[in-house]
Amino acid sequence: MTTECLTNKKVLTKGNYAIAQAAILAGCQCYFGYPITPQSEIGEFMSGKMQELKRGYVSAESELAAINMTIGAVSTGVKAMTSSSSCAVALMQEGLSYATADELPVVLISVMRGGPGLGNIYPSQGDYFQATKGGGNGDYHLIVLAPSTVQECVDLTYKAFYLAQKYRNPAVLLADGLLGQMMEPVEFYDYPYPEIDTSSWALTGAKGREARIIRSYAPLADNQCVFLEKLYQKYKVIEENEVEWEEINTDDADIILVSFGSTSRNAKTAMKQLREKGIKAGLFRPVTLYPFPNKRLHELAQKTKKFVTVEVNMGQMVNDVRLAVNGACPVELVNKGVGAPPSAAEIVSKIEELL
Amino acid sequence: MATQVFKLPESLKGDVKYSFCPGCDHGIAVRLVAEVIDELGIRENTILSASIGCSVTTYDFINVDALEAPHGRAMAEATGIKRARPDKIVFTYQGDGDFASIGLAESMHAALRGEKLTAICINNTTYGMTGGQLGPTTLLGQVTTTSPTGRNVDYYGYPIKIAEHIALCDGTAFSARVSLDTVANIRKAKQAIKKAFEVQIKGLGFGFVEILSTCPTNWKMSPQKAHERVRNEMMAVFKPGIYKDQT
């Protein structure tokens, strides 16, 4: 992969490189990371490019350090990010909890691999809970965006920087090993979002103003209650304004496949094959995993007969779909623990068993 | 005519509730840092990466922008601040548990990378805020709430000599250990703190000062006795001195 900036040109590139290049184009001023397969290309790309551009780069001593370096950088008002994978994102959970409490726009690229424990380097969606439910302490949410193509890796990396700054909340691009490693044609373009003014809160030195303290320490319970109410008001605004999903053939569907990320591509093919067999199938693909498209799923539950989530994990998003549907119709699971997503043929045959 | 003989440093917030225990050396250390920031004229360009422990309240006293790091991560957050804003003066103020136990990796690697940062580490041989448990600097034989019969090597191993270790890192430009038990030593401490900031300002590398400090509450001693302990017991193991000076 060249380190040239390639705006407005179609190039064939890997998901990891696409993410890194998009971060550069988004104006990411600092990158901090520690190697882990299957996302190491992000740090490799950044090490060269950030130095070339005279931006910040640190080969951090650990993921604990990497997430906290990112917190430090964004506290000064600049865009910054880290990237990692599964068992190492686990090490970042403390930092993510702090970043939500500090209301800091950290961007994390999480490229999922097999777990639990060391697991393996195959693709996985086993960190849906880790990303959407929060592995850190206390009440908080991360904004979670799930790309399904390499092009979307670019689009949603831009969006992650924008939403993180807009809401002063950490945002996660939740990709997987398949997206990270596969090559597809991609078009890069200029950062499409407005720049957010950070001057009202960023730490830049107390020149001509009161000194600012960014902290999460709240020794009095009442103060913490006030903060949590404010934080959850913000989440309400995010839930009202930022939900994104894709749906195909859902209008007349008797069965709706719900799937995110790379897995949703096989689910889409399976949906088409089911249609060819005369089964009225549709596809629902959440793009934002938090905020989750609860409302739309609830609406669809009133007219469809069944949902089936297709996931590469032991059944995680299925729980959120069940909550959204709230008993209006059955919600089943077609899954595979880890690895490349189940093929369209496998999905079709499992769904036929369910009917 | 009245002559002003005493005033608060500008870098010290005036009207705040003092939260350290009576006789604790944190008060002196924080004041010295504030005086140095004043003398270097850097208050409006300085950012503090605060830590967890008794040191957490430093931002209540020192009148600069501050970011509160998780326990042990102050050097990592300071690194992030400095890499994002290389023109800022960035420092941490940490306890020995924060700097040399849970944050040892962050501290050593910041020094090894030669980060243009200043770290002030308060060594009081115990975890003060949580009630006096054994820490990385607890002396052999010292009784704490988690070494009820005294620190023995079999169960606990040895205390760490922080200033010596940091001096061994090639990226370190200044490393010293000081104490606050006498007026003369307080003066030396201030000079060391100033140098630790100056090496950052000059871009020479990592600046570090370990400050031997009292914890009368957890040591269950009067402030006077506590300073005698610093002199007689701590200094015997943690020898004050300048371990590296590349100025």
Image (cartoon, coloured by chain):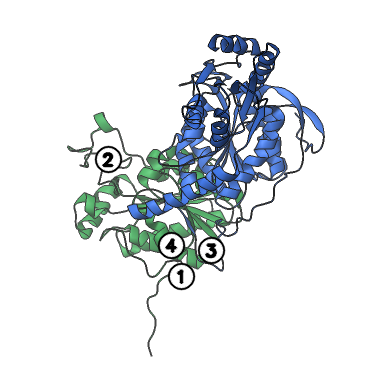
Chain colours: A blue, B green
Label 3 SS = loop
Chain letter of disc 1? B
For label 4, the crowd category at 10 Å Cα-Cα, with few meaning under 14, some 14 to 19 and many 20 or more, is many
Q: Which residue is mark 3?
A: A206
Q: Which residue is mark 2?
A: B134
Label 1 vs 2, first from the N-terminus: 1
Q: Residue at x 38, y 39 (%)?
A: B101
Query: In the orientation shown, which residue stands out farthest toward the bottom?
Result: B1
Q: Which residue is mark 1?
A: B10
Q: Split into 4 quadrants, where in the image is the C terminus of chain A?
A: top right
Q: Nearer the viewer, residue B102 or A148?
A: A148
Chain letter of disc 2? B
Label 4 vs 2, first from the N-terminus: 4
Residue A211: percent from left, percent from top: 49, 63
Q: Are marks 1 and 3 in contact (CB under 8 Å)?
A: no
Q: Is residue A25 left or right of residue B229?
A: right
| Vertical position of residue A278 compared to residue B194: above or below | above
Q: Are marks 2 and 3 in contact (CB under 8 Å)?
A: no
Label 4 vs 1, first from the N-terminus: 1
Q: Nearer the viewer, residue B152 or A266?
A: A266
Q: Are marks 4 and 2 in contact (CB under 8 Å)?
A: no
Q: Are marks 1 and 2 in contact (CB under 8 Å)?
A: no
| Vertical position of residue A75 compared to residue A342: above or below | below
Q: Which residue is mark 4?
A: B62
Residue type marked 2 = Leu
Foreground label between 4 and 2? 4
For label 2, the crowd category at 10 Å Cα-Cα, with few meaning under 14, some 14 to 19 and many 20 or more, is many
